Amino acid sequence: MQIRKVEWKELSLPFRANIQTSYGVQTAKHFFLLALEDEQGFTGYGELEAFELPDYTEETLEGAFGLIRRLLLPLLMKQEISHPREVRALFGWIRGNEMAKAAVETAVWDLHAKRKGISLAELLGTQRSTVPVGVSIGIQPTPEALVKTVGAYLKEGYQRIKIKIKPGSDYEHLKAVREAYPSISMMADANSAYDWQDIELLKKIDTLDLEMIEQPFGVNDLFYHAELQKQLQTKICLDENIRSLADLEQAYRLGSCQAVNLKIARVGGIAEALDIISFCVENKLLVWCGGMYEAGIGRAFNLALAGNEVFTFPGDISATDRYFEKDILTEDFVLENGSLRIPSGIGIGVELREDLSTFTKSEGTYYFDKKEGE
């Protein structure tokens, strides 16, 4: 395949309600949408998931898109691609910038599936038609407010509850939910909000029968995660630490975790994600599919991947209306008995709305061997 044209849009989708984590408050999903067209006229889509500030990882939305424009697209458009895995090798010499790489690489996977006339789910070996899902709940002002919020999502049918925590909004909040709902599947996500001095607090949280505690320490703290795991019964799940298979191999050898929150964008794309899944299976690590408040394109990729039977733990792939009043797709993802349906059309199996002008901040087009605007 030869990429001949790339169209992009800078979009902003307001959240239905502000989302608060230990990193801060988000009011909207800002992202770039890429549309790669090949020599046969097929189009593959990719969604750039980097955040506006370098808090979750070092990447920023503006910086990642700048790298895509200046470096990744010119590299890709000069290359004949026979399989999407070649994109990882093409970009392999570039350090970091996983989300920028993933936005381009995933679009090539979509394009490849469309050229074959099959769904991406089928291409990835997905065996299911639906995926059981959980919900991630931002930090609430009081334990009472959290219990009420959890109850509402349980009524909607979500099969697992993830609760964001930070110092001052942790043990008492989690304890209130556990007392209100003794048998639900729940976990805590710290987003690196704690350090080793908080170990006694984390031991208290360990008594609440959680599925796991996600990312209690910083993104470079594999050693301290390993020391903590030795003292907890609850699984430690790593998120921000794992940018590649090499990161996971090191974490495994140190004993830093028993579970992995796998995000396609955070590890640089689908090829790396598939290798991480294989490693987790071989070494009996729990792996599940996380989310980054994706709009419809990114959500479709997550569902195609999470349909693999390896994923036994409900991931963070909530219904469209969990985050947005209106998405960029013609059809929303709707919760059905605690699950979401995997798109079965060719490629990622979804269609964009014809008019995205309400959400569009800027847009442009690139052609093979031409500069923008020529």
Image (spheres, rainbow, N blue to C red):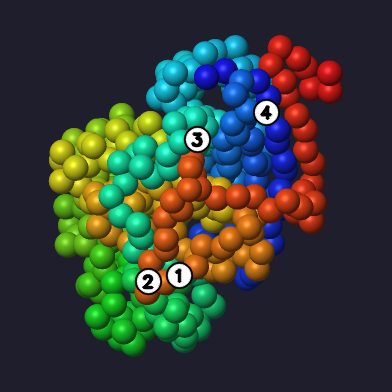
Q: Residue at x 38, y 45 (%)?
A: 121
**Residue that mark 1 sits on:** 335
**SS of the residue under disc 4:** strand
**Residue that mark 2 sits on:** 338
Determine which of the numbered discs, if any, sits on residue 45 in the image: none
3D distance between C-alphas at marks 4 and 1? 33 Å
Mark 1 near mark 2, Cβ–Cβ under 8 Å? yes
Circle nearer the viewer, 4 or 3: 3
Give the percent coordinates (x, y) of residue 55: 55, 46
Front residue of 270 and 246: 270
Which sits earlier in the primary sequence, circle 3 or circle 1? 3
**SS of the residue under disc 2:** loop
Which sits earlier in the primary sequence, circle 4 or circle 3? 4
Residue 214 shown left or right of residue 19 in the figure: left
Within 10 Å of disc 1 (Cα), the crowding (few <14, some 14-19, many 20+) is many
Give the percent coordinates (x, y) of residue 291: 46, 53
**Residue 70 appears in which quarter of the rendering?**
top right
**Residue that mark 3 sits on:** 114
Which sits earlier in the primary sequence, circle 3 or circle 2? 3
Residue 246 shown left or right of residue 44 in the figure: left
3D distance between C-alphas at marks 1 and 2? 6 Å
3D distance between C-alphas at marks 3 and 1? 26 Å
Determine which of the numbered discs, if any, sits on residue 6 in the image: 4
**Residue 163 appears in which quarter of the rendering?**
bottom left
Type of the residue with mark 1: Leu
Which sits earlier in the primary sequence, circle 4 or circle 2? 4
